[in-house]
């Protein structure tokens, strides 16, 4: 069976990157309260350090993220009761969030960029909640670019 990574390789990678960067922008903009202010502040720092850093990070992480989500994606493809990956992820949001965060945790740990590492570590405590909240958008992106056939 074709993996999620392989399926995403058949579409315009830049479009997937752009759509993912827009999802991240939208998710960050939607946050409120003190944690939202901290997240928005950290995000502004990242974008100020390198304006195209989000797109570059998405490009660098896309294959790892798609590999991390592939076991859930394969299960989804076999499930005749669910039509969209967005819906499927609702039942596995903790697993999906932890699978995705394991990648960014490792990358942050190995980063040479002190400011980015410090910012990531400062925001990591709330990251699982934010990633879970973003999963419907992630599911929609996958439904758009690698739909169930």
Image (cartoon, rainbow, N blue to C red):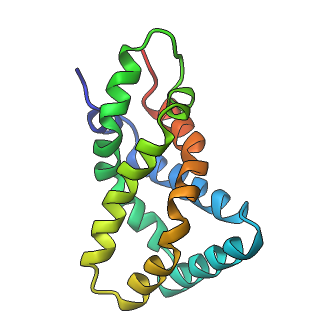
Question: Can you give x and y, in whole percent of width and height, for residue 32 in the image?
Answer: 76, 67
Q: Nearer the viewer, residue 18 or 147?
A: 147
| In the image: residue 20, left or right of residue 33 | left
Asked if residue 4 can be seen in this view, the reply is: no
Q: Is residue 75 above or below residue 61?
A: above
Instruction: Mark yes or no: residue 63 visible.
Output: yes
Q: Residue at x 37, y 30 (%)?
A: 73
Quick check: 101 above or below 99? Answer: below
Where the N terminus falls, by quadrant?
top left
Q: Is residue 40 left or right of 92 when viewed as pictured?
A: right
Q: Position of residue 85 (x, y in %)?
A: 50, 28
Return the residue found at the far bottom.
114
77 with respect to 109 (left or right)? right
Q: Residue visible at 29% across and 69% down? A: 107
Q: Position of residue 106 (x, y in %)?
A: 27, 67
Q: Quadrant of residue 10?
A: top left
Q: What quarter of the picture does the C terminus occupy?
A: top left
Which one is nearer the viewer's eye here, 101 or 11? 101
Residue beneath the point at 29% across and 49% down: 63
The residue at 53%/54% (across/down) is: 131
Image coordinates of residue 91 in percent, x first then y, are 52, 31
């Amino acid at each position: 069976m074709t993996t999620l990574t392989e399926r995403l390789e058949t579409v315009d990678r830049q479009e997937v990157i752009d759509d993912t960067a827009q999802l991240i922008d939208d998710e960050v903009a939607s946050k409120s309260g003190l944690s939202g202010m901290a997240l928005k502040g950290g995000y502004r720092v990242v974008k100020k350090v390198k304006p195209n850093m989000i797109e570059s990070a998405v490009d660098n992480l896309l294959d790892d993220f798609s590999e991390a989500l592939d076991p859930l994606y394969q299960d989804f493809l076999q499930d005749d009761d669910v039509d969209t990956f967005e819906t499927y992820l609702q039942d596995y949001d903790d697993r999906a969030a932890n699978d995705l965060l394991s990648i960014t945790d490792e990358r942050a740990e190995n980063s040479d960029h002190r400011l980015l590492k410090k910012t990531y570590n400062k925001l990591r405590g709330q990251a699982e909640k934010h990633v879970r909240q973003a999963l419907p958008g992630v599911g929609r992106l996958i439904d758009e670019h690698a739909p169930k056939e």
